Image (cartoon, helix red, strand yellow):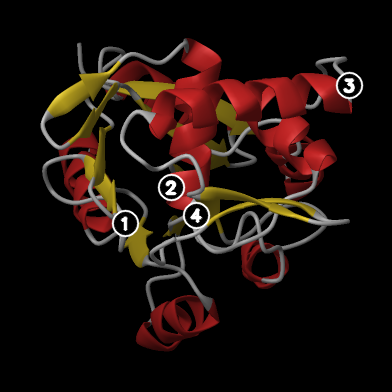
């Protein structure tokens, strides 16, 4: 079964949020919505969506200001963003794109056009190929199949081990503290301790050791863990 695309919709008009929820196919999309950037910030503390649909005109902080904030957050900065807005003027489109939006769609729009734009933006990702695969060294993670292969062998991973490897492969060469890993792999409302993180890292390394990749996830003394794209 194909993994759903998780969208965070930041839109203050309830009618548009309802239209999107009704129009986007449930078997393809998992929708999370927020009426303003304050609520969206709280959602992002526990969830990393595949893509953000962002209105320009919002109560409090505007969509443009929110993009600037997103781009300053290391863990969130690579999330693709499509702006949804009634501002159709070319100068506004340029402002949105130059600020960091990946695409810009003006209201009113058709659901079919939006779906096409979403899929086009996601295909541009540097790490996820059009075949829904992420590759680091000779490790291939197929997002659609929830499957990991090394040298054509399927690696049996638990759900947590899979999510952990997926997270690291999406963010290679970056160090994450145990607290950050708890938030972004288990969820911010999960109460586990650092020892659980260490134990899961050990289990994942043990499974990768059959393919001499036990050191791909490195311990950064005093800081946390990092997946290294470079050879051991």
Figure check: 31 above or below 40: above
- Quadrant that contains the N terminus: top left
Which residue is the site of mark 3? Answer: 193
**Residue assigned mark 4:** 79
Asked whether the residues under the numbered discs 2 and 3 touch, taking CB atoms below 8 Å apart as contact, a structural biologist would say: no
Can the viewer see residue 25?
yes
Q: Are marks 1 and 2 in contact (CB under 8 Å)?
A: yes
- In depth, the one of 42 and 95 nearer the eye is 42
Q: Which residue is mark 2?
A: 169
Is 2 displayed left or right of 52 in the figure?
left
Residue beneath disc 1: 127
> Is 115 above or below relative to 193?
below
Category of crowding for the residue at label 4, using alpha-carbon neighbours closer than 10 angstroms: few (below 14), some (14–19), many (at least 20): some
Question: Where is residue 88 shown, x and y percent of the image?
Answer: 38, 72
From the viewer's side, name the closer residue of 13 and 22: 22
Q: Are marks 4 and 2 in contact (CB under 8 Å)?
A: no
């Amino acid at each position: 079964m194909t993994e759903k695309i998780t969208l965070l919709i930041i839109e203050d008009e309830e009618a548009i949020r309802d239209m999107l929820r009704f129009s986007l196919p449930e078997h393809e999309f998992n929708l999370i919505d927020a009426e303003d950037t304050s609520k969206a910030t709280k959602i992002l503390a526990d969830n990393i969506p595949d893509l953000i649909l962002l209105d320009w005109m919002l109560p409090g902080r505007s969509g443009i200001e929110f993009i600037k904030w997103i781009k300053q957050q290391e863990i969130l900065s690579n999330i693709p963003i499509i702006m949804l807005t009634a501002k159709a003027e070319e100068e506004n489109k340029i402002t949105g794109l130059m600020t960091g939006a990946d695409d810009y769609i003006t209201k009113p729009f058709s659901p079919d056009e939006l779906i096409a734009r979403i899929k086009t933006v996601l295909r541009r990702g540097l790490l996820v190929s059009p075949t829904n695969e992420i590759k680091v060294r000779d490790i291939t993670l197929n997002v659609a199949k929830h499957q990991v292969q090394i040298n054509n062998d399927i690696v049996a991973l638990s759900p947590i081990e899979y999510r952990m490897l997926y997270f690291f492969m999406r963010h290679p060469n970056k160090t994450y503290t145990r607290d950050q890993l708890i938030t972004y792999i288990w969820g911010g409302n999960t109460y586990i301790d650092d020892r659980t993180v260490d134990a899961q890292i050990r289990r994942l390394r043990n499974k990768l050791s059959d393919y001499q990749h036990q050191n791909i996830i490195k311990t950064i003394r005093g800081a946390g863990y990092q997946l290294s794209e470079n050879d051991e």
